Amino acid sequence: MTDTEKIAFKNRLKRWALDLITERINTARAVIDAAQEAANNEEKSSAGDKYETGRAMGHLQQEMHAKQLTEYVKELSILHSVNTDILYNEGRAGAFLKGTDQSFFIAAGLGKQTLEGQMIFFLSPHAPLAKILQNKKAGDNITFNSIKTTIQMVF
């Protein structure tokens, strides 16, 4: 893989992550709006407790999705700050690390994803595994959750 191809690959990973997080933000906003609308349209019945319970459940659901929305917006902000136009020789935000059995992209905490035929762990730069990968170079060994791997390539 040439240097240009490596940068293009990382940029595709970042673009995919940006799209996924944006989709999650839009979904969370839609759910929050729907929950608010449902709460506003709830008619008070003769059974006041039922009405109050319905409104309380709606507010709890709104709060839960609002927290998720806040996390997605934070993750999106972190991802925007990650530079994928540089080839790195050690683990850090914006680096792609290819291990013996796993590949890692330190940019956004999206977990295990399959892209372009590869299983890739998308890690937040603040994740415990990203901290272990910090400053690791090709040839270095890491152990995480009793799984050992050798870093074969970093870019």
Image (cartoon, rainbow, N blue to C red):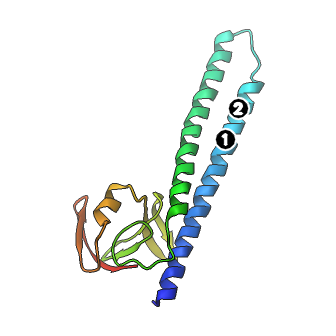
Q: Count neighbours of disc 1 (C-alpha within 10 A) and say few if under 14, some if 14 to 19, many if 20 or more.
A: some
Q: Specify whether 47 is left or right of 98.
A: right
Mark nearer the N terminus (1 vs 2): 1
Pinpoint residue 74: horizontal percent, then vertical percent.
53, 50
Nearer-the-camera pick, 66 or 78? 78
Residue 91 occupies quadrant? bottom left
Name the residue tied to disc 1: 31
Q: What residue type is labelled 2?
A: Gln
Q: Specify whether 36 is left or right of 155.
A: right
Q: Is residue 43 placed above or below 127 in the rendered structure? A: above
Q: Residue at x 63, y 56 (%)?
A: 22
User: Regarding mark 2 in the picture, which secondary structure is present there?
Assistant: helix
Residue 140 occupies quadrant? bottom left
Q: Which residue is drawn at 61% across and 22% down?
A: 56
Q: Is residue 93 placed above or below 69 in the rendered structure? A: below
Name the residue tied to disc 2: 36
Whole-angstrom CA distance, mark 1 to mark 2, is 9 Å
